[in-house]
Every structure is written in structure tokens, then in C-alpha cells.
Amino acid sequence: MWTCKKCNREFIKTNQSHSCVVYPIDNHFRGKGDKSKALFNALTKSIEDNIGKLKIEALPCCIHLVSHYTFSGVWILKDKIRLDFRVDYEIKSKRFVKVEKLSTNRTLYFVEITKEDDIDPELLGWLKDSYNLKS
């Protein structure tokens, strides 16, 4: 792992390009309501309880969820949260609001969480695969 001397974020690649902007996580929740924060807290707790240790990095664009690399991005919306994750296999599901093919062996999936029940074994399985993905 390489640690940026300016912002102390860790990356797999030495001198990986990134933003060193410090952004308070609470800024993401301003004006969004309590539901979104509760969903975010339920998501991060479920990941820590079922998958593994989690580092949270708040950036101006979104909130990154980090294992040995950034495996998910989370956007805080008014009454829900949207998250992305990448895996090295194809998933067919109506749960995805967007899918982007990143390369021949990486696909990025976007899911919206509107209730705690959306954080189910199926989603946690996908997130576990993303969490453990080799770079």
C-alpha cells in the first residue's frame, strides 16, 4: 500500500492520482433527512458485521467505502442512498439502476437502497465479492 503524504489516504498503486481535498462526512447528510443517514449507518454496519473491516473516506463527490482499495461509492440522496460496486463477473438483476462495463473483466453496478431490507444477503454477497476483488 502507498500512503499519500499530503492527505494520508492509502492506495494500492504508488503515486496514484487522486484528490487530497478533505470533506467532512456530515456535509453529505445536510438537508437530506434522517432516513438517508440511517440507511448509510445500516449499510456500513452490515458490511462490518458480515464482510470485514471498513474504512470510510468522505470526498466531495461521494463517500468511498474502502477495504484494501475503494470497493464502493455511496451517494446520499433525500430519502435513499445509491451505491456502486465493481466485480469481475456479470450479474443479471432488476435491482440495478445503472450498469457500466469498465473493461473486459470489470463491471460497475449501481443500486439504490430505499429501506433497510434492501441490505439483504444478495447485496451483501455482491459487496463481499467487490470488497475482496483483486486489483
Image (cartoon, rainbow, N blue to C red):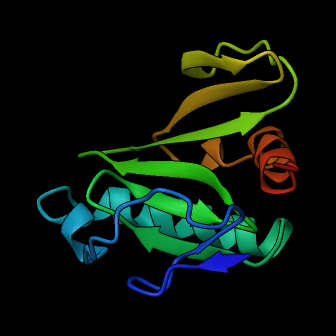
Residue 84 vs 72, above or below: the answer is above
Judge by depth and name the residue closer to the eye, 50 or 86: 86
Residue at the location (76% across, 48% down)? 127
Residue occupying the point 51% across, 49% down: 73
Q: Please count the marks in the image.
A: 0
Q: Please tell me whether residue 64 is drawn above or below residue 109 in the rendered image.
A: below
Counting from the top left corner in percent of width and height, residue 37 is at: 36, 65
Picture quarter with the N terminus: bottom right
- At x 66%, y 76%, the residue is 2
Relative to residue 21, is residue 113 drawn left or right?
right
Q: Viewed as shown, does residue 87 lie left or right of 2? A: right
Q: In the image, residue 69 lies at what x, y percent?
A: 69, 61
6 left or right of 49 in image: left
Seen in the image, is 35 located left or right of residue 95?
A: left
x and y percentages locating residue 88 in the rendered image? 85, 30
What percent of the width, then of the height, locates residue 46?
A: 70, 66
Which residue: 73% across, 15% down?
A: 93
Q: Residue furthest left?
A: 31
